[in-house]
Amino acid sequence: MKLKKYIKDKGLTNSEVCRKAEIGEATLSQFLNNKRGINFETACKISKALGISTDQLKKLSEEGKENEGNCNN
């Protein structure tokens, strides 16, 4: 998944992303490992934590039917 590499390339750990996004580590881990999808609210939180749009998150995650749209940050 491109998103894992993106997080690593930004110099972040999964724990840091979770803290910034205010989500549980299990949620992010399951999403990164294609074990579960995420809702729009969670996509917005992750996007904001990474400084990217939900569209970019969708492209990086290669999933995202439920992640379409943009957040008002």
Image (cartoon, helix red, strand yellow):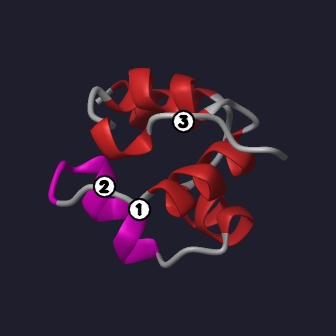
Above or below, 64 against 62 in this view is below
Please tell me whether mark 3 or mark 2 is closer to you in this view.
2
Above or below, 47 against 24 in this view is above
Q: What numbered label is drawn on residue 8? A: 3
Task: Confirm or deny contact between disc 1 and disc 3 (CB under 8 A).
Answer: no
Report the amino acid beneath label 2.
Answer: Phe
Disc 2 versus disc 1: distance between alpha carbons?
5 Å
Q: What is the magenta range? A: 25-35
64 displayed left or right of 44: left
Instruction: Tell me which secondary structure the magenta stretch mostly adopts.
Output: helix
Identify which residue, 54 or 21, lies in the foreground: 54
Q: What is the residue that sits farthest to the left in this orientation? A: 35
Report the amino acid beneath label 3.
Answer: Lys
Disc 1: CA contacts within 10 A as few (<14), some (14-19) or many (>=20) = many
Where disc 3 sits, the SS reads helix
Percent position of residue 21, x then y = 67, 64
Where disc 2 sits, the SS reads helix
Disc 1 versus disc 3: distance between alpha carbons?
14 Å
Above or below, 18 against 52 in this view is below
Task: Confirm or deny contact between disc 2 and disc 1 (CB under 8 A).
Answer: yes
User: What residue sits right under mark 2 in the picture?
Assistant: 31
Q: Is residue 34 magenta?
A: yes
Identify which residue, 40 or 30, lies in the foreground: 40
Report the amino acid beneath label 1.
Answer: Leu
Q: Earlier in the sequence, mark 3 or mark 2?
A: 3
Q: Is residue 43 magenta?
A: no
Residue at the (55%, 23%) spot, across then down: 56
Residue at the (43%, 42%) spot, across then down: 67
User: What residue sits right under mark 1 in the picture?
Assistant: 28
